[in-house]
Amino acid sequence: MSSDLTDLCRYPIVQAPMAGGTSGPQLAAAVAEAGGLGFLAAGYKTADGMYNEVKQVRRLTGGPFGVNLFMPQPALADPSAVEVYRHQLAGEASWYETPLGDPDSSGDDGYEAKVAILLEDPVPAISFTFGCPTRDTLDAFARVGTRTIVTVTSAEEAQAAQWAGADALCVQGVEAGGHQSTHRDDPQADHTGTGLLSLVAQVRETVQLPIVAAGGLMRGAQIAAVLAAGADAAQLGTAFLACPESGAHLLHKQALTNPLFVRTELTRAFSGRPARGLVNRFVREHGPYAPAAYPQVHYLTSGLRRAAAEAGDAQGMALWAGQGHRMARELPAGELVELLAAELEAARSALTMRSPR
């Protein structure tokens, strides 16, 4: 791995920050203990809630870990489109016997407060989703010794992050589960994302920063492939979702390998932003009509998703998953890191043996 990241973990394996309770202290600590780089997901949490989880990780491990922050989103949503979608979801609210949420709950996710806490009490690494911080913010983290990683989905976004002063990039291919971390949510660009291997190669030719590749990776051989393509490390989310340390709902974990869920799709149905998940009833019925309105739609559907989980109904849940979800393995996170590292080494050895002398 590049010198900017090499001292953070023994293996070039990063556990993706999955918001909504999946990437909590237990998962991040277990990955760090095994030699990977674990991440807490601060998205949808209060600043105090984030800080409490940081303290929990420190009690569980002395290893390096990171925290992921959501960038504040511009107010671009059409209120009338959100209201139309609210009416469409009225049947869901009736079915699950729960009210729809307030779409205007929050737009900045407590970003400034979280930044202030992490500058006061630094962690080894911070990654950013849905945009790029200002140079002043990135410089401030550099002064306290925190490595900064900006998630990008194009060479243009990578170039902007380099200009802003990021230490590294998380390059996210269209195969990735959960939200696509585009810096600008453009409905005209829906379903036009770039595959990971092509994107890594494009970014490597555009910028000089270390690259963490993300998108559908489930095996050590795939990690070897993205490293060969120019990445310095690999980030895996869905692969860790099934681990016992993951905070994902049991129904979500089971759905990854359930033959009832045969494919994934990018949808705005649950949050108003493109996100890849398993195709269920909710996605089929509401995905085509969901407006480009994040985080308004996220807050609008939050009660529905919670009620569906409580009712044991996976057809109404947001089952975020990458394209490799059928390859999920129910292993403790530490064992999974060690297995991925062994598979990576085996893939490298096989490639060396096949290379002409």
Image: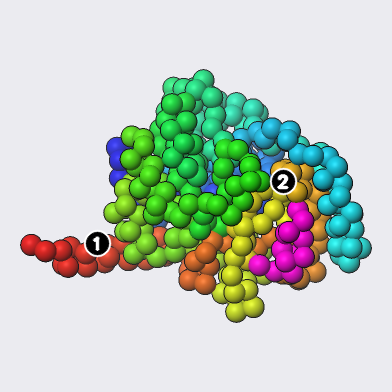
Front: mark 1 or 2: 2
Q: Note whether 174 is above or below 153 in the view shown.
A: below
**Hey, what amino acid is under mark 2?**
Ala
56, 95: nearer the viewer: 95
Spatial CA distance of label 1 from label 2 is: 43 Å
Position of 334 compared to 191: left or right? left
Find the residue positioned furthest to the bottom: 259
Q: Quadrant of residue 70?
A: top right
Give the quadrant of the C terminus.
bottom left
Magenta-span inclusion, residue 283: yes
Residue under numbered circle 1: 348
What's drawn in magenta, residue-wise? 279-290
Q: Note whether 147 is above or below 280 in the view shown.
A: above
Who's the residue at 39% across and 54% down the image?
197
Residue 58 pos. (x, y %)? 51, 43
Residue 72 pos. (x, y %)? 65, 33
| Label whose residue precedes the other's in the sequence (1 or 2) | 2
Q: Note whether 193 is above or below 321 in the view shown.
A: above
Residue 314 pos. (x, y %)? 72, 69
**Hey, what amino acid is under mark 1?**
Arg
25, 130: nearer the viewer: 130
Who's the residue at 79% across and 39% down the image?
78
Give residue 292's mark.
2
Give residue 295's mark.
none
Who's the residue at 45% across and 46% down the image?
171
